[in-house]
């Protein structure tokens, strides 16, 4: 049996001591840090946890409660804004009627002949817009003829105004000397609980007048004979017209 070959150790190498194990390369700081990062990243204690069914149900209930609180408040705010815009429209309209009357012998357009700039000969169903067009010099824009709560579109200029752009009726028997007469107002009227359509409505003493839920939810606004504006309900409207025989031109 041949003896094992001997390894010659050079001068720059050191022979291992007897009984010692060969040294292994220890990981440096960067290796330890990376290893620690991997361990902590995969640790179950820090891993993201998904919603349980109970937690998801709680979130849905909270969102539903918030919606029940916020949505009615937003609807009320929108309704108030629309009523404010409607009142502004009618105030401009009432002022325009008064200016027209001052320039035309204390008469409104429906009492002044067309030859004199009025619309007396144009009093007919479907011609409400012609009464307002007679006041185009007094009204700044036809946009005020459409209520913000109405689904009807606003006209951008007087040449394009039609009956479909009008939200307000005209009281054909109103006079500047009768301050409580109905001069104009929201078109969403009812008679004896039945919605009023477009056309000429003659009020009688045995007629119950009110508002539909459209536009302002069983409420509305009136322009009186003196040009003032009032916010009304169905009950107030009935008292307002009691004993009057007014004719209303409904668009």
Image (cartoon, helix red, strand yellow):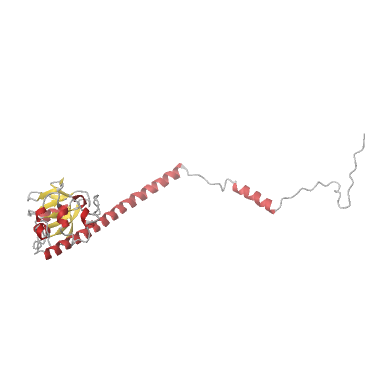
Residue 188 appears at what percent x and percent y? 18, 50
Residue 230 in view: yes
Q: Quadrant of the N terminus?
A: top right
Residue 137 appears at what percent x and percent y? 18, 62
**In the foreground, 114 or 228:** 114
Quarter-wise, where is residue 182 in the image?
A: bottom left
Residue 174 in view: no
**In the foreground, 209 or 35:** 209
Q: Is residue 21 above or below residue 231?
A: above
Quarter-wise, where is residue 243 in the image?
A: bottom left
Q: Residue at x 65, y 50 (%)?
A: 34
**In the foreground, 224 or 105:** 105
Return the residue found at the far front. Answer: 115
Q: Residue at x 15, y 54 (%)?
A: 130
Return the residue found at the far top. Answer: 1
Question: Total label count?
Answer: 0
Residue 230 appears at what percent x and percent y? 17, 59
Asked if residue 33 lies left or right of residue 171, the reply is right
Q: Residue at x 21, y 55 (%)?
A: 159
Q: Residue at x 66, y 52 (%)?
A: 33
Asked if residue 20 lies left or right of residue 215, the reply is right
Asked if residue 53 lies left or right of residue 150, the reply is right
Residue 205 appears at what percent x and percent y? 7, 51
């Amino acid at each position: 049996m041949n003896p094992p070959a001997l390894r010659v150790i050079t001068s720059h190498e050191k022979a291992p001591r007897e009984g010692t194990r060969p040294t292994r390369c220890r990981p440096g700081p960067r290796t330890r840090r990376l290893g620690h990062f991997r361990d902590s990243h995969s640790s179950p204690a820090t891993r993201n946890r998904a919603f349980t069914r109970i937690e998801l149900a709680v979130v849905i209930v909270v969102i539903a409660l918030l919606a029940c609180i916020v949505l009615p408040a937003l609807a009320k705010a929108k309704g108030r804004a629309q009523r404010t815009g409607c009142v502004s429209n009618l105030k401009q309209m009432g002022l325009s009627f008064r200016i027209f009357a001052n320039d035309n012998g204390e008469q409104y357009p429906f009492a002044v002949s067309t030859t004199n700039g009025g619309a007396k000969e144009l009093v007919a169903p479907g011609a409400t817009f012609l009464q307002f067009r007679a006041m185009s010099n007094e009204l700044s824009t036809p946009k005020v003829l459409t209520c913000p709560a109405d689904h009807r579109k606003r006209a951008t200029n007087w040449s394009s105004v039609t009956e479909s752009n009008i939200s307000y009726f005209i009281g054909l028997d109103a006079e500047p000397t009768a301050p409580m007469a109905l001069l104009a107002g929201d078109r969403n009227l009812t008679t004896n609980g039945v919605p009023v359509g477009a056309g000429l409505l003659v009020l009688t003493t045995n007629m119950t007048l009110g508002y539909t839920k459209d536009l302002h939810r069983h409420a509305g606004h009136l322009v009186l004979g003196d040009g003032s504006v009032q916010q009304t309900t169905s009950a107030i409207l009935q008292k307002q017209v009691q004993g009057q025989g007014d004719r209303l031109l409904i668009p």
